Image (cartoon, grey):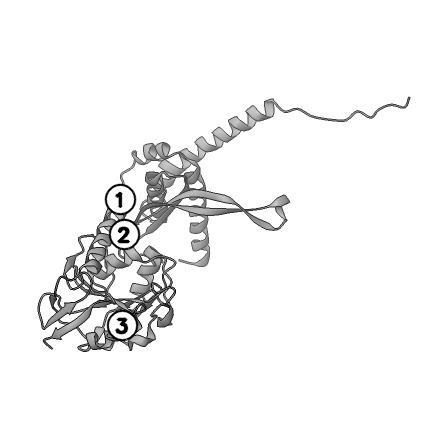
């Protein structure tokens, strides 16, 4: 009878888990290309990875419209879980979303379908949470930018393969732009809008 | 479950909630200690928040915002799948969790009778006794005002 019977729980320890996840995301954003771990324990709906679930529970609230890609919205599990635990509205229009959850990175839509923010409010942009196949193995990506001493090497199986080429629009858009958080299981890597690709091994 | 069955279940949950929300946390804990609790997990950890209280002057005036009240809420799921929700005024997180647990047990066919008999009924009795006592105390100090009609001259 009840529709909540199958819903995975949220954080076991709300405050400390949200704080430690926030710290991981902040460190990842401050050191682009570095792999950070999300230690928090939470239930995970089908289709989501542990890292993206913890990020959702930490950063999403009723003020942050969420856009789900086809893989995430294949069943209503993710949307219902988000609504119950974060009360974030799930929107169909990606250009007004604060966060976009991408389960199947290969079919990432064109980046100009997301919000870039405005020159007055560059923070009103979409942050992509992209689930990838690996963040420790795969082709190397050499990155530079604020927060990186010299260059940083990221080894990852990232799809779409041309992700960094697509992100090069950030150069001309600045201060507007798109921030990306790559997630694999409990590992996260942030690619903020100021990070540039030096060389890639793809 | 038919529509009437559902409605009566809903009425039972409502009645239970009305009692539990007004009982103190310690009272509920004392009653719950008497029964064997089923296996359950916390779906939503107890959390505090604010609700806006609205009022109407005279009952039919335009609604206005009276002020905000602190509310705690929690959600609990029994191993058998029933999900209970608890909301209560104030910041007593454990009370919200116990209310959610009672709500889940009221819905379960297995525990409904026991929780009704050993937790909710005694609390209801205590609550109504307390209300009657207060009512009597208030009634004892009642004063009737009346105006005497002043005579001519």
Labels 2 and 1: the sequence-earlier one: 1
The residue nearer to you, when weighing B76 against A100, is A100
Q: CA distance from mark 2 to mark 3?
A: 51 Å
* Left or right of residue A131: residue A138: left
Label drawn at residue A170: 3
* Rendered image quadrant of residue A175: bottom left
Query: Do we see residue B40 in this rendering?
Result: no
Q: Which residue is mark 2?
A: B80
The residue nearer to you, when weighing B126 against A95, is A95
* Left or right of residue B26: residue A28: left
Q: CA distance from mark 2 to mark 1?
A: 9 Å
Q: Residues within 10 Å of mark 3 (few under 14, many from 20)?
A: many
- Give the label, 2 or 3, closer to the camera: 3
Vertical side of B126 occupied by A152: above or below = below
* Rendered image quadrant of residue A37: bottom left
Vertical side of B25 occupied by A51: above or below = below
Q: Residue visible at 37% across and 64% down?
A: A121
Q: Mark 3 near mark 1, Cβ–Cβ under 8 Å?
A: no
* Left or right of residue A62: residue A188: left
Q: Mark 2 near mark 3, Cβ–Cβ under 8 Å?
A: no
Q: Residues within 10 Å of mark 2 (few under 14, many from 20)?
A: few
Q: Residue visible at 44% across and 31% down?
A: B126
Q: Residue visible at 46% across and 48% down?
A: B11
Same chain check for tags 2 and 3: no
């Amino acid at each position: 009878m009840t529709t909540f019977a199958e819903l995975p729980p949220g954080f076991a320890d709300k405050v400390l888990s949200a704080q430690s996840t926030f710290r991981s995301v902040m460190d990842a954003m401050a050191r682009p290309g570095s792999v950070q771990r999300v230690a928090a324990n939470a239930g995970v709906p089908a289709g989501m990875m542990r890292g993206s679930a913890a990020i959702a529970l930490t950063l999403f609230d009723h003020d942050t419209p969420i856009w789900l890609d086809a893989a995430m919205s294949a069943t209503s599990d993710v949307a219902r879980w988000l609504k119950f635990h974060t009360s974030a509205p799930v929107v169909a229009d990606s250009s007004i979303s604060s966060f976009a959850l991408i389960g199947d990175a290969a079919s990432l839509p064109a980046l100009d379908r997301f919000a870039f923010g405005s020159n007055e409010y560059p923070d009103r942009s979409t942050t992509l949470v992209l689930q990838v196949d690996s963040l420790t193995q795969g082709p190397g990506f050499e990155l530079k930018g604020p927060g990186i001493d010299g260059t940083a090497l990221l080894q990852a199986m990232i799809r779409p393969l041309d992700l960094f080429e697509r992100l090069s629009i950030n150069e001309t858009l600045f201060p507007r732009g798109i921030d990306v958080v790559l997630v694999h299981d409990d590992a996260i890597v942030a690619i903020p809008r100021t990070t540039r690709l030096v060389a890639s091994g793809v | 479950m038919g529509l009437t069955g559902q409605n009566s279940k809903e009425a039972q949950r409502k009645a239970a909630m009305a009692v539990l929300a007004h009982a103190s946390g310690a009272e509920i804990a004392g009653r719950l200690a008497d029964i064997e609790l089923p296996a359950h997990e916390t779906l939503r950890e107890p959390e505090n928040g604010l609700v806006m209280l609205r009022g109407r002057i005279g009952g039919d005036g335009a609604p206005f915002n009276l002020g905000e009240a602190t509310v705690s809420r929690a959600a609990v799921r029994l191993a058998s799948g029933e999900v209970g929700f608890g909301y209560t005024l104030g910041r007593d997180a454990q009370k919200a969790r116990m209310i959610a647990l009672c709500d889940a047990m009221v819905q379960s066919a297995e525990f409904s009778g026991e929780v009704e008999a050993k937790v909710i009924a005694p609390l209801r009795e205590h609550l109504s006794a307390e209300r009657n006592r207060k009512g009597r105390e208030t009634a004892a100090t009642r004063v009737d005002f009346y105006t005497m009609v002043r005579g001519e001259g």
